[in-house]
Image: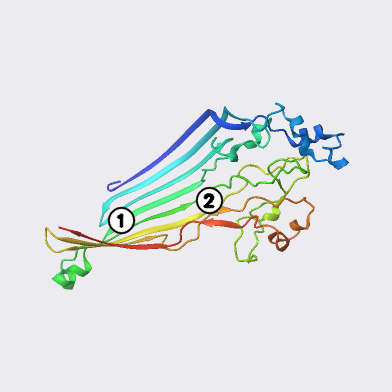
Amino acid sequence: FRNALVEIGYAGSAGNHLIRPVDINAPTPQEILAASAGIASCDPTLGGNPNNCTNAARPYRGFGSLVDRQTSATSRYHGLLTSFRLRPTRGITAQLAYTYSKNLTDATNDRDAIDVPQIRTNLQLERAVSRLDRTHVFVASYVYEVPTFHSGFASSGVGKQLLSGWEIAGITTAQTGLPLNRVVQLSTAVRPRGTRPDLISDPTENIPVNPVGGIPYGFNPLAFRTTLPGQIGNSPRAPFRFPNQFFTDLNLTKNFHFSERYKLQFRAEFFNIFNKTIFTDVSQTIPDRLPTDSAFNSISNLVAVSPFGQFVAVRDPRQIQFGLKFNF
């Protein structure tokens, strides 16, 4: 257009032979129970502790954890990228950008234990959206310079100083929340099991309201259950997302021109001006209880045992800062 530009494009990428961590000496829960069968000190049915036979179940006996960084991971990205740019028109300059995309991978990185596969012999269980995936991202940046008036009070000395030289700029972001990397269950000595629980219903439905203690829930914790000893949970990596995010940063500027040599600038900057609460972390370790435990019967029972499912961190609230600059 005469003063604007619209762009629409597609971007795709594929990554193969990416680095991933794999504990090649981690026995599966079934292997531990199989090695414990019939041994009095190990078999839980005989009063034993399966942890005593962990070494017998390892592929490489006599060694503990052996984390191997393999080049076996993959990633796939597809994105629709659009933008609109407006050149200065009647004091307004703006740029809008919208991206619709998906990023699938079976290992987001190799720097922490989050991406260590639950089962060393089945890496396909790890395939899910990346920890950095956002389905929708919309960002608008804009600047408006209040025009200078040439008649009436606004054009007088005092009026010109008060009503001209104003500038408003801001950035507004609306985007899909990031995926939760995983929900974790503990694999204890007496209950060898996978690192993820069972998912029995949609965790984004029936989220508790007005919880005890006033701390909101990010998902319905009763949608998850621990597994029995020897079992692998069906909860995937990235089982759901954090809430969508919407926030605006705004900047108000007033320039005072006393002469060609002297200028005074006042700035008022508002970060997260509408004071939106943006959650960044949630308690994701399910209580170490049997799936038949009464803790999973109600939220009141569960909250007495664990904050599982409740938010534990947020971004900064609204912040305001002022600045004054004198040019000479």
Compare residues 58 and 246 and report the one nearer the observer: 58
Residue at 36% over, 47% down: 84
Question: Which residue, given by chain and number where applicable, does mark 1 sit on?
Answer: 143
Given residues 181 and 165, the one toward you in this image is: 181
Tally of numbered discs = 2
Circle 1: element type? strand
Can the viewer see residue 156 in this picture? no
Above or below, 57 against 195 in this view is above
Secondary structure type for disc 2: loop
Residue at 67% in and 57% down: 306
Q: Position of residue 178 (x, y in %)?
A: 53, 48
Q: Where is residue 224 in the image (x, y as percent from the top left)?
A: 70, 50
Q: Give, as a three-letter code, the residue at label 1.
A: Val
Residue 56 image point, x, y percent: 76, 30
Specify the label residue 131 is tagged with: none
- Front residue of 66/150: it is 66
Left or right of 127 in this view: 39:
right
Looking at this rendering, what residue extends furthest in the left direction? 260
Q: Where is residue 118 in the image (x, y as percent from the top left)?
A: 67, 37
> CA gap, disc 2 to disc 1?
27 Å
Q: Name the residue under label 2.
A: 177
Q: Of marks 2 and 1, which one's residue comes earlier in the chain? A: 1
Residue occupying image coordinates x 17% and y 60%:
263
The amino acid on which the numbered mark 2 sits, given as a three-letter code, is Gly
